[in-house]
Amino acid sequence: MLPPSSPGARPSMSRPRALFALLCLCAGACNPELGLAIGPDASSSSLDCEEPEIPASGDAGIGDAGIDDGGVPGAHPVVIVSIDGLRADAVALAPADTIISLACRGAYSMDAQTILPSTTLPAHASMVSGYTAEQHGLLHDYMKADCYIEVPTVFGLAEEAGLRAVIVVGKQKLVQLAPPGTCDEFLWISAGDAAVVDAAIGAIEDGFDILFVHLPEVDYAGHTSGWMSVEYLAQVRAADGEVARLVAALPAGTTVIVTADHGGHGTKHSEGTAEDRTIPWIIAGPGVRQGTEIGAEVSVMDTAATAAFALGFALEPDAVGRPVDEAFAP
C-alpha cells in the first residue's frame, strides 16, 4: 500500500528486479538446497521453494517451530526484524541464505516500498505504527530528547491488550519509537548486530509476545563503502548470519517478519529513488502460505498492521497500514 501523500509515485525498479531474478538464478546454481528458481521460470523474481531449509544453530526456532503446524494467527508470538538499509536486490546478490530460506518457508515481496522520507527514524516509525510520516510526526532523523512518536504503535496496542512487548535496537534515536509505558523493555545496544542479537536472545529467554529487533550495521556499511559494494554485501551476509542465530533461539510457533527501513544508492538513501525505497518484506509462521510471492503492493506501514493481525488485534482505524492478507492461508 502506497503512502497517501504520494499517489502514483511508486518508483521504478525494473532494472534491480531484473537483476534480482538473475541473482536468484545464480544463487540457486551455487546453492541448490535453497530451492531458487532455475530454468523456464528464472526470468521471474519468484523463488522456487520446493525444498526450503532454514539454517539453525539449535533445536528450537522457526525451522521446526510449526510453520507447517496448521496454526492460526492470534495465538503465537511475533518477531519483527528490521535490517537497517537492506536493499531488496541485495538479498540474492549477497546471498542472504537465511532470509531466502524464510521466504521459501513463508510469503515474500522483493518489491515492498518504504515511505518518504526514506530515512531511518521516519521509516521505522511508519513500520511500527502503520502511519505516514506526516501522521506520526517523526520527520527528523536524529536523536531528540523527550520527543516521541505521536500515534499509537503496535507495541503500545499490544501492551493495552495485556501482551509483553520488547524492543532491542542498535541506534539510540529509535528510543523515540517507544514513549514511556508503551513497552515492557527497551534496550539500546551500541556494539553492533551480534550484540543486539545477544540481547534479543536474552529477551526471548525472558518471554515475549512481540519482539522488535533492529540490526544497524548494513546501513553503516552502505554509508561507508557504498550500497551494493563488496563490503556492503559482506555485511548483508553477516547480518543474515545474525538472523539465523536469532531464529534458532525462537520458541515454537513464532511468526517472523524480516524487512528494512530503506535501501540506498551510492553512500546515501535520502533521495527517495527506487533504490532508496524498495525493500524486502518476508513473513513466515503459523497460518502463513509457504513459498508465496505476494502480488499485491506492500508498504513498510503494513508491517505493524500484519504483526497486530498475527497477535489477534488491529491498529487504530485511521492507520494507513493494512494486514498483508495475501500472505495468510485462507
Image (spheres, helix red, strand yellow):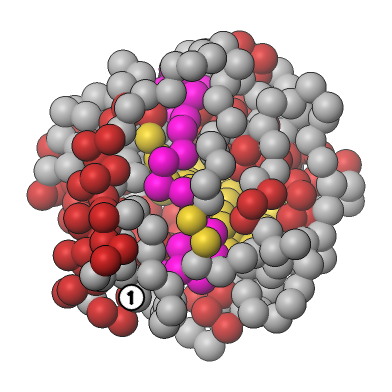
Q: Nearer the viewer, residue 176 or 12?
A: 12
Give me the residue at 17% from left, 42% from top.
228
| 91 in the magenta segment | no
Judging depth in this view, the residue of 189 and 9 nearest the camera is: 9
| Relative image position of residue 102 (x, y in whole percent) | 47, 66
Q: Which residue is mark 1?
A: 34
Q: From which residue to which does the magenta span run?
A: 101-122
Work out which residue is located at the far right of the displayed protein and give it. 161
Residue at 76% x, 73% y is: 71
The answer to whether residue 216 shows anywhere in this view is no
Single out the residue that lies furthest toward the bottom. Answer: 59
Q: Is residue 112 left or right of residue 98?
A: right
Q: Looking at the picture, does residue 44 appear above or below residue 69?
A: above
Q: Secondary structure at mark 1?
A: helix
Q: Is residue 193 above or below residue 278?
A: below
Whether residue 296 is visible here, answered yes or no, is yes
Which residue is at 60% across, 16% downward?
4
Measured as percent of width and height from the top left, residue 82 is found at: 47, 46
What amino acid is found at the position of numbered circle 1 in the picture?
Answer: Leu
Q: Is residue 116 magenta?
A: yes
Residue 83, percent from left and from top: 41, 47
User: To which quarter of the image does residue 48 belong?
Assistant: bottom left
In the rendered view, does 83 fall on the left or right side of 201?
left
Q: Name the one closer to the observer, 57 or 188.
A: 57
Q: If the image is split into quadrants, where does the C terminus sit?
A: bottom right
